[in-house]
Amino acid sequence: MTLNQQQTSLCNDNPHDHSDLSAVIINTTLKRDSSKSHTKLLLDVAGDIMEKNQVSVSHIHMLDHQVAFGVQPDMTEHGHDRDDFPKLWKTISAANIILIGTPIWLGEESSVCRLLIERLYGMSGKLNEKGQSSFYGKVGGAVVTGNEDGIKHCSMTILYALQHLGVTIPPQADCGWIGEAGPGPSYGDDADGGPVGFDNEFTQRNATIMTWNLLHMARLLKDHPIPNHGNDRNAWDAGCRADFENPEHRR
């Protein structure tokens, strides 16, 4: 989808420099072929806005990769013959923005999305040079599509998981589209002479606001990183050991 006039105008009139930012857009659709993914079409709205603002954008289609189940950084060290996640982590860890897209199934995010969240959780022990979670300094968002209720529920699950890992969640960091309940056209399908959802003002507005909030928050964190006073895990561990070793504190 090309951006609409309002979305293009916002990009053209942007007074802020985002050219040193990077984003990773992760599609957790159940479709093997990314070109058939309805979720990708809405993710591309955010991706196009970012690219028009000179953000370096990487796309990951999860089912293009063989990602093992588990919550360890490399599951080949825990009985799996193959695990592509360590390679994907290099892209994810380098990004300032993490945007996760999922379809809705039975009111929940996809099983592939759940797998991604579990693997990200497996990296929560990784620390940056300041002793903080390696997810500090990153911002996160969620994009949801489907033919049943669940946009807010899926977004709640994804965004909670990201913030728990250390990702910063900006205001209104999600968007989505759902059609009528039951079988019917999905986002981007041709119906009534045009692609479904492309002209849905609510969806396009929220996708635009989400993307700009991701950019603004990423800019703030890039220029002003979160201080490590009080959240330095190394200092906390050292302090706890000192307390334990102090005979006065063991009485």
Image (tube, helix red, strand yellow):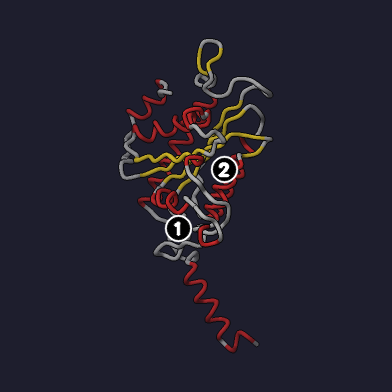
Which quadrant, please, contains the C terminus? bottom right
Q: Which residue is mark 2?
A: 113
Closer to the chain start, of discs 1 and 2, is 2
Residue drawn at x 68%, y 23% as measured from the top left: 182
Q: Amino acid at mark 1?
A: Ser
Corner quadrant of residue 152 = top right
The crowding category of the residue bearing disc 1, from other C-alpha atoms within 10 Å (few below 14, some 14 to 19, many at least 20), is some
Which quadrant, please, contains the N terminus? top left
Instruction: Please give left or right for residue 115 compared with residue 26 in the image.
Output: right
Answer whether residue 208 is visible to the viewer in this image: yes
What secondary structure is marked by label 2?
A: helix
Relative to 184, residue 95 above or below: below
Residue drawn at x 47%, y 66% as measured from the top left: 232
Q: Amino acid at mark 2?
A: Cys
Q: What percent of the width, then of the height, locates residue 11?
A: 36, 30
What secondary structure is marked by label 1?
A: loop
Q: Which residue is mark 1?
A: 134
Determine the residue located farthest toward the front in the rendered image.
81
Residue drawn at x 32%, y 28% as measured from the top left: 12
